[in-house]
Image (cartoon, rainbow, N blue to C red):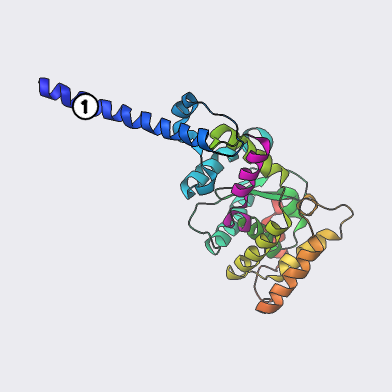
Amino acid sequence: MLNSFFFIFSRFSRRWLYLLLSVLVALGICIGSPQKTQAISWFDILIQGVQIFQLSNISDQEEVQLGKEINQQLVNSKIQLYLNQNVNRYVNQIGQKLAANSTRSDIPYTFQVVKNESVNAFATMGGYVYVTTGLLKAADNEAQLASVIAHEIGHIASRHSIEQMRETAIARGVATAAGLERNTAVQIGVDLALRRPNSREDEFEADRRGLRTLGRAGYAQSAMVAFMQKLLQQRSLPTFLSTHPATNERITALKDEINSQKGYGGGGLNNAAYEAKIQPLS
């Protein structure tokens, strides 16, 4: 029995020793880092543990979990979801078809309709995409709606939100050598989803990825250009374009890409069929 006691005590001691060594290593990184970062105490590291995200090498699983928490904050306090089951099912079917044909089809995707009359769409990390009822009404057909969703999937496939979160955390002085605390990461994610500060380069990349996804899913790639041109002709620039730089340049680049692929074919252009699908919105 005495031997058993010493064996248990030895295993217990080793666990605490490993934990202490982990804390000391983390402290050493924080102290030895030449970057100017916000201090984080050993007690915070000990208590928070897995609640610290290292954005430079975040895993798919961590990204999906972080996106889930950002989505919960958005749904609970920032946006109002449109709850008609038929419309939501329709949008989800389009989104899942596009996601399966994207360059990042190995994570789960969630597509939601936001009750808002502005013409807008946005995404956050981990596969969460949002389109407004105003955008659904503005689109002429399924291919045009799909072109917007494909663009947002392009942002997710490129992990633009993660890079923006990292840059924002550094600019705000909340990043540490150990990483970014979970609650801070969620709040930044919510702000980024609603504020959409996408760079010119990010938009061009999301356009290219989205256009190819659109074609692989069987939709007419020309719908992406047609929808942008339609929105530009409106009296006031919709939110979806006003927060995205260089729209005319993007249209030119998309036309060149379509011409190079001979991508004017494809489906989803039946206006009457689309209007029937979104009829509950009228």
Q: Position of residue 59 (x, y in %)?
A: 47, 48
Farthest residue toward the right? 235
Q: On screen, 214 above or below 26?
A: below
Q: Position of residue 226 (x, y in %)?
A: 77, 67
Say if residue 201 shows up in the picture: yes
Magenta stretch bounds: 154-173
Q: Position of residue 68 (x, y in %)?
A: 54, 41
Q: The residue under label 1 is which amino acid type?
A: Ser
The residue where tag 1 is placed is 10
The majority secondary structure of the magenta stretch comes to: helix
The structure residue drawn at horizontal position 62% and vertical position 52%, both measured from the top left corner, is 160
Question: In which quarter of the view is residue 18 placed?
Answer: top left
Say which of 82 and 230 sits in front. 230
Q: Position of residue 173 (x, y in %)?
A: 65, 35
Say if residue 80 shows up in the picture: no
Q: On screen, 271 above or below 241?
A: below
Assess whether residue 164 is covered by the magenta stretch.
Answer: yes
Q: Quadrant of the N terminus?
A: top left
The mark tally for this picture is: 1
Specify whether 12 is left or right of 27: left
Specify whether 215 is left or right of 66: right
Say which of 38 and 80 sits in front. 38
Instruction: Specify few, some or many for label 1: CA neighbours under 10 Å numbering under 14, 14-19, or 20 or more.
Output: few
Question: In which quarter of the view is residue 84 placed?
Answer: top right
